[in-house]
Amino acid sequence: MPSIYLHIPFCKQACHYCNFHFTTSLRYQDDVVSAICKEAVLQKDYTGKGIIETIYFGGGTPSLLDLDDLRQILQTIRDHFPVDAKAEITLEANPDDITSKKLQDWKTAGINRLSMGVQSFFEEDLQWMNRAHHATEALSSIKLALDYFDNITIDLIYGSPGLSNEKWKQNVQTAIDLGIPHLSCYALTVEPKTPLDKLIRLQEKQDVDPDLQSAQFLLLMEWMAAAGYEHYEISNFAKPGWRSKHNSAYWQGKTYLGLGPSAHSFNGSERQWNLSNNNLYVAAIQKGELPAEKEILSPVQQLNEYIMTALRTIEGIQKSILQEKHSVDIPAFRKKAEGYIRTGHIIEQNGSFILTNEGKLLADGIAASLFV
Ligand code: SF4
């Protein structure tokens, strides 16, 4: 069953590490919201007759949207797509936007899952990242959100200079103690052309240490397993029954439609992505045009994409899918994986090739060497 992603390209301030598409000018918010609704109508056939199983407001900062904007977008989707009555509807929210009124509004609008961009519970880390919220807000906003939502995930960042293993442990433990059922944890990545990249080049900020990141990832896996969370994707941990349906759909290669500037769509064999420019996006949509580029994936690209995403999941690369969907010869594939099986980076289990914890440290490189 398909999914819909909505990209809301506005933020209060620019986090130094971020390379997503957003603007800190909120002036044209209404125009972008109208264009997103119009794009939904233009794209109403993209998902075929499939019932929409998940809707995800990402960005940017969707928690900046007014209630009317949120309602308008959801109503337009419901008017033009068949949406499952039990659809998972997630809103990304930053701690500094969270109030009782907003939580109540989101709930009545139909949001049933919150993804909170916490990143750290330490003030010095938040300042280092140039986040808009403070450590006290990180904690108080989660406590408040738990009064309204049980399905909450929070994002945490590890491997940033200044984050000792002890502080990292406190961040993870705080989330566990709060009873958050889902955690997404990302190693800080220095993306080209971000303020962080520039500041590191100017030697105004310390660069990341890959060894520290690996050590903190190994610790994270140990702590989360001990706390009863499934490590169901390389960056994602969930208590049983609390996996993200939306992200799982991506990893299972299901169809999704992305609406909004820079949003990506995928239908199994074609990928398309909208312009990462708010004004050009709005202008094109107003003319009834889709501001998207498209790429048709060859069978080899589809297979490599499966290898890349499946290897990152708890299910691993399934032999039945390799054989039946991609016509792969299993003995030949095993031969490629053999070296990693011998070194303990991959295990062959339940008809799948699955990364071990050590293997997860090298996931991208291992996937690349398994490509055809
Ligand atoms: S709030 Fe999110 S999208 Fe906006 S700048 Fe920060 S990390 Fe990027």
Image (cartoon, rainbow, N blue to C red):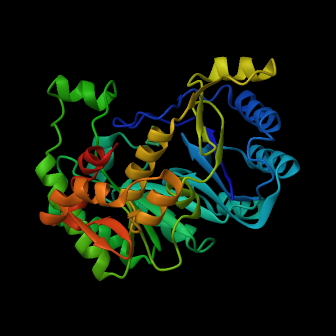
How far from the left and from the top, in percent, is residue 182?
46, 69
Residue at 24% over, 53% down: 336
Q: Place residue 103 in its image quadrant.
A: bottom right
Answer above or below: position of 262 versus 75.
above
Is the C terminus in the top left, top right, bottom left or bottom right quadrant? top left
Q: Is residue 289 left or right of residue 56?
A: right
How far from the left and from the top, in percent, is residue 61?
56, 43
Answer above or below: position of 23 versus 133.
above
Residue at 13% over, 65% down: 342
Q: Is residue 165 left or right of residue 105?
A: left
Residue at 83% over, 50% down: 75
How far from the left and from the top, in percent, is residue 126?
33, 48
Q: Is residue 33 left or right of residue 95?
A: right
Answer above or below: position of 353 versus 82.
below
Q: Is residue 80 left or right of residue 273?
A: right
Q: 171 or 100, which lies in front?
A: 171
Residue at 51% over, 35% down: 298
Q: 32 or 25, which lies in front?
A: 32
How far from the left and from the top, in percent, is residue 35?
75, 30
Q: How many marks?
A: 0
Is the N terminus in the top left, top right, bottom left or bottom right quadrant? bottom right
